[in-house]
Image (spheres, grey):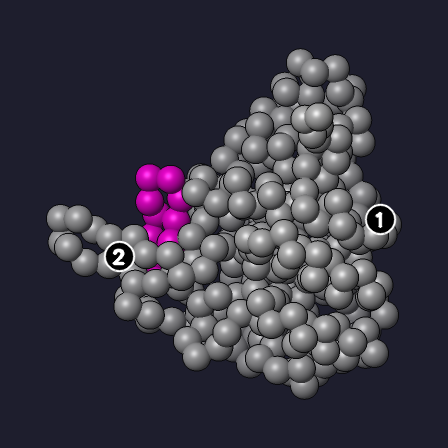
Amino acid sequence: MISTATKLANRSFSNCMMNAAGVWCMDEAELTAIDDSAAGTFVTKSGTLVSRPGNPEPRYYETALGSINSMGLPNHGIDYYLDVVAAFQKKNPGKTYFLSCTGFSIEQDQTLLRKIKDSEFNGIVELNLSCPNVPGKPQIGYDFETVDQILAAVFAEYDGPLGVKLPPYFDLVHFDQMAAILNKYPLAYINSINSIGNGLYIDDEKEEVVIKPKNGFGGIGGEYVKPTALANVHAFYQRLKPEIQIIGTGGITSGRDVFEHILCGASMVQVGTELAKEGPQVFERLTKELQDIMAAKGYTTLADFRGKLRHQD
């Protein structure tokens, strides 16, 4: 029997696929739809200390090969998501969920983690270090010294399973430098990649940009970013200590894309742009396509090919 089940942070999941934070996870209704789908679990919207309306609309636009967005972290606040996930935990006590959060300072990150530690949450935390679309705020993931400081502060406060969502990196030296920092800490996983920041998409007929915030600059997702996502997954798979697993995100539109992320070293995958286009039923299609590829290649589990990308001599 062909299985797409996986393990991450010593937790078991029936399927290696889930939503990406930011897509189909704003409220309880959307999270319920993911929970009822073929996805193995869900991750919440990145919760901040207080609710945020996000950037002015239009702030998301579908393109032929993906999407551009400048959402600005709209969310209902960390307390809302803690309450929602607590209800899911009571309903499905054998299932593990992911709670995403992000602060705008080290102190806010510490406060968020204290709230989570003091709650009934028993899942996995995803600390977002990579939101590229908050005006006036740089991407934390590109400030290596600050990342080091945040992780030191976070793990002084929190001892549960925790991973970090990272922006894409484009230089081999940056992979070396970031991996050296990440390897210092007891991270459960990294999530790579978030959207490629500050792209620009133009409506030729109107001769104008398609989203309002930041004069049209926004994060690029979808098919455009898959080569960058695969490179990041594989680069970190080669550099991180084995205890730090990888969730691969970026450019997943088919079961073959899922296969390639796992081949590069991912233990799980998250789907964003394609989920926004198709809705939660996308997970049933992706799972079937991945199983067909595994059957054709004679694989029965993800472990049969995870991280086994061949390099040419």
Q: Is residue 299 visible?
A: yes
Which residue of the protein is positioned furthest toward the bottom in this rendering? Answer: 107
Residue at the (76%, 61%) spot, across then down:
180
The circle drawn on residue 210 is 2
The circle drawn on residue 177 is none
Q: Amino acid at mark 1?
A: Pro
User: Where residue 146 appears, x then y in whole percent?
Assistant: 66, 76
Residue at the (57%, 36%) spot, across then down:
283
Q: Amino acid at mark 2?
A: Val
Q: Is residue 25 visible?
A: no
Magenta stretch contains residue 65: yes
Q: Quadrant of residue 18?
A: top right
User: Where residue 280 appears, x then y in whole percent?
Assistant: 53, 42
**Which portion, as a residue range, is magenta?**
58-69
Q: Quadrant of residue 72?
A: bottom left
Q: Nearer the viewer, residue 307 or 1?
A: 307
Q: Is residue 189 above or below residue 142?
A: above
Distance in Å between CA atoms under marks 1 and 2: 42 Å
- Indicate the secondary structure of the residue bearing disc 1: loop
Q: Is residue 186 above or below residue 223?
A: below
Q: Nearer the viewer, residue 236 or 159?
A: 236
Q: Nearer the viewer, residue 258 or 94?
A: 258
The quarter of the image holding the N terminus is top right
Magenta stretch contains residue 42: no
- Indicate the secondary structure of the residue bearing disc 2: loop
The circle drawn on residue 242 is 1
Q: Main secondary structure of the magenta part?
A: strand
Counting residues from the start of the chain, the first of labels 1 and 2 encountered is 2
